[in-house]
Image (cartoon, rainbow, N blue to C red):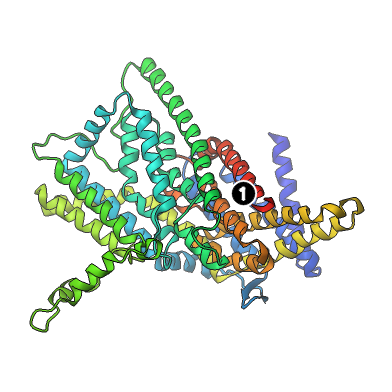
Amino acid sequence: MKTNAKFKMIASIASVILIIVGMFVPSNIGMPMEIIGMTTIFILSIIKWIVPSEKNTILKLLGIIVLYLGALSWVIPAATFQYGEFQSLGLERMTLFNLIDYPYLSIQFFLQPMLFIFAVGGLYGILSETGKFRNVLDKIVKKLKGKEEYFLIGSSLILTVVSALFAANVEKGGLYGPNLVLFLIIPTISAIILLMGYDKMTAFLASFISPIIGIIGGIYSPATSYINEVVGSDYSTELIWKIALLVICYVMYLFVLLKQAKKSKERKIETEKDTKEEVNKNNIPLIGEKKQSKKASWPIMLILGLLILVMILGMFNWEKIFNITLFSDIHTSITEFEIGNHRIFNYLIAGITAFGTWTSLSEITVLTLAAALIISLIYKLDFETIITSFTKGVKQVLKPVIIMTLAYTIVIITAYNPFFMSITDWLINSLGGGIIDALGKVSFLSGAMDVIKQIVYIIVCGLDTIISTILNIDILYVIQSGLPYLVSSYPEATNSLAIITQSLHGLTLIIAPTSALMLVGLEYLGISYKEWLKTSWKLVLQLLAIILIVILIIVFI
């Protein structure tokens, strides 16, 4: 222990010296010294504050990342890439005022997803108050007794496929697409899994990670739409390999899920054997406790089913993908219908756009609130009960929303202090170009330079995507940050670049400490980030191997 303490102290002192010296030497030498010093302090901070911690690890980690990125903005020049040219803007430093201002801006710019999660929390608060929702879930669990693994497979497959195929409108996409919207049904799925006797990690894998697997092999997903626009490809580009990647990654993920489920059941049996009593099932988020009620349960199932159906119909871009104009035609007919030169229906539904054209979360949030109100009226909840139960549901998702706010604060930092483009420039020219120049001087490698260039290209693009995903979170900002520069630098490799960006973006979201959906899931189910890393690192390496094999095949065949 004393040796470790001495090592940390020496490393801290050395880091401070590097930073100070770096401030007074030429920038080509000083900037790397400052970055190394800051990164060392960042790592030491994680070791000190995160590794031994058992509570609020995600909040602490995000706070440290915010400070680290703020420090980097003082040493890495901001830059842009516009009209095919890279331009350095000099240092655009994050200030002490920005530490307060940026979280406020993240709320302002990303208010829709936060309000959506609050609305979902409120809806489930109402559902739990009716007394029928928990009863319905218990009946489902009873009917699935002995078939629990089939439910794990079926629910995870549905979430994966929806994420991969759900073509949300490109204007908003990213977390405004299927992945966050699926939080509408995720609490139900995770609750059923927990009621089956599985642990929280199994529920997390099945309900929160499966949509991210869908991103890796996305076919009509928002990520695919954005990437197609930038690289000039379309949905049919490398379609076979996208499908193959999706299937293989899902199978690998499913193996890990079922293995975790088996361990969970074994631990449950041992716990019940030791304690002589059932594991408590009353601490499951958002579903409430069992209540006696004579009212029918079918209205709940009908309203939730209609809500999910309308969400899919509204947010899927039917016209762009399948050239289906039915919904827009119906909407036009209704809004243009006249009675005595008055478009009565247009007056009544103005603001509601046609299915397939919803480009934000506002419509589905309003419908979620409407569903909560309708359920309250059907089950005759009084006003005070409605407010109390809705507020109770909102409180249960408050901490995940705070986590999301901090995660989005990182997006604000990289947007207002755009130093990431300088990182992309370094990866392309200094790392990639430096490796090629160095190996080009080795005579016996001259015949293999074409292969080496392709491998260097994969490394550069892969690192850029991974770093950009950690810093920018949402696929829209990931693509806007470095992808145009990569397309300009490697114009002959746009097809493989699309696969690299999409697959590695999805892979990074599984473990990135800024992945909003993952962080919401961990906080929602009360799982520490450390515990998730211990569970997921093998899966991530396995998926990485699969992705690299597919990329190599696309590049070299």
Q: Residue at 45% of width from left, 30% of height from top?
A: 258
Closest to the observer, 319 or 52? 319
Whether residue 533 sits left or right of residue 377 in the image: it is right
Quadrant of the image occupied by residue 6: top right
| Image location (x, y in percent) of residue 471 | 56, 59
Whether residue 182 sits left or right of residue 64 in the image: it is left
Quadrant of the image occupied by residue 262: top left
Q: Is residue 354 visible?
A: no
Tell me which amino acid carries mark 1. Ser
Q: Is residue 356 visible?
A: yes
Quadrant including the N terminus: top right
Q: Which residue is mark 1?
A: 45
| Image location (x, y in percent) of residue 91 | 66, 73
Question: The residue tagged with tag 1: helix, strand or loop?
Answer: helix
Q: Residue at 61% of width from left, 46% of height from top?
A: 550
| Image location (x, y in percent) of residue 418 | 59, 69
At label 1, counting other C-alpha atoms closer than 10 Å, the crowd grade (few under 14, some 14-19, many 20 or more) is some
Closest to the observer, 473 or 122? 473
Q: Residue at 77% of width from left, 69% of height from top?
A: 27
Q: How many marks?
A: 1
